[in-house]
Amino acid sequence: MSTRPPMLVSRRRFLQTTAAASALFAAPYFVPQRAFGANERVNLGFVGCKNRGMQNMEGFKIVGKDAGKMATNCAAVCEVDSNVMAAAMKAVEKDSGSKPSTFGDYRRMLDRKDIDAVVASVPDHWHALITVDACRAGKDVYCEKPLTLFVTEGRRMVQVARETNRVVQTGSQQRSDNRFRQACELARNGKFGKLHTLVVGLPKPNYAAPEKRVADSDPPSELNYDMWLGPAPWRPYNENHVHYNFRFFWDYSGGQMTNFGAHHLDIAQWGLGMDDSGPVSIEGAGTFPKDKDLCEVSDTCKITYTYANGVKVILVQPQRGNRPRGEAAEKTPPTIEEAIKAPAGGVIFYGDKGSVLVDRAQILADQPELLKTEFGSGDTQLTVSRDHYQHFLDCMKSRQKPITDVEIGHRSATVCHLGNMAVRLGRKIQWDPAKEQIVGDSEAAAMLTRPYRSPWKLA
């Protein structure tokens, strides 16, 4: 692994000059790296190719049964596990008939002038660095949720995206689902009265079983473990801490709060019209596993977020058992008391004249006619995206902000982080969403940021 800090490519000065000119003339659009022809394919560089990385390749129609049906090309693949790299390359070559360049260090991939956008499907502790470096290299970015590992990363990501005029889309794909948009439009327009409460459910962490516990060891030869750690603190390799299981350790992620919570709390923010803000107080309690070598994050929790307008978002973990995908389990939204006792894996909006439940299988209203509502010119009508990946490509060409712009991803991730902080501290937190500061609690305020392991820096 190269030990020098992340590089800035030669285009940086040009991009800074362009950003200054854009501000001077108040241009309401981004400056593209290059113009795209109507049928021209967008060259994508994928960083991270396991689990979600392969799902994103399928989403951009690089692999899978629909490979080739989107105007995309896999120009490069970056992966720190050679076995994962080999499997990804085999799938790309088989389904797309192409052989992209391969890299073990994403910075070398960013040197490629022909790459238009980077798709980051890596553990959360890498999201900020890769996004910032890609923006400075003149690439647009599709970054998986949660956008950040801690709060101050997000504000820096927004600043750099704006300075470099890059399109940055967060992978919170529920905003590209018609059901979630409909629920939020009904809520935003007061179609079932004044909102007062939302209930969100999260699953328990699905970490390795105790019988699969293993001792720390040397990393396998196929894994560049130092590069996998990157900016995270050094700790001995353990196979139960990497790949999918990274999300259950604070150094790399925030548990199901920043996994499913990043989806459902994002919808809560959308439905409340709080994309540029957040709650003003957060209080919660939870329990944590005894086996810290298998999981550090919460097993159970209950968190109450209170917004300045008095609306409360109540998050409960665990949700009741999962049902088969696509199978609708409800007939009508439960009462608030029922929802808190056995929450669904989605979001329930409660107004003073009705309620709406939405998840990935269904949208329900206590008054079914609500779902037939037609919105008029005087109503708030939210951005329509029917495909999260195509929407990103469309925004690359139009230079418009995407439906889950970097600012939105940052704000939604912040709600997740604040919830985790309240549970870990076991006390109420006061939050100033305008200043993005903790009020009157120095210990909590210190949790808004973390040091990076040398030589990594978020410049």
Image (cartoon, rainbow, N blue to C red):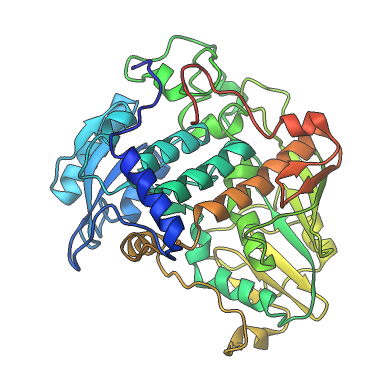
Q: Is residue 10 above or below residue 23?
A: above
Residue 85 placement, left or right of 445: left
Quadrant where the image shows the N terminus: top left
Foreground residue among 176 and 9? 9
Residue 6 in view in this figure = yes
Q: Quadrant of residue 226?
A: top left
Q: Is residue 459 above or below residue 374?
A: above
Whole-percent x and y of residue 204?
66, 42
Foreground residue among 192 and 452? 452
Residue 438 placement, left or right of 61: right
Foreground residue among 164 and 92? 164
Residue 114 placement, left or right of 5: left
Residue at 24%, 45% (x, y): give it: 115
Residue at 41%, 21% (x, y): give it: 5
Q: Is residue 439 above or below residue 179?
A: above
Residue 384 placement, left or right of 185: left
Q: Quadrant of residue 332?
A: bottom right
Residue 166 in view in this figure = no
Residue at 77%, 61% (x, y): give it: 339
Residue at 36%, 46% (x, y): give it: 17
Q: State the residue lying farthest toward the top.
A: 218
Whole-percent x and y of residue 254?
62, 36
Whole-percent x and y of residue 103?
26, 29
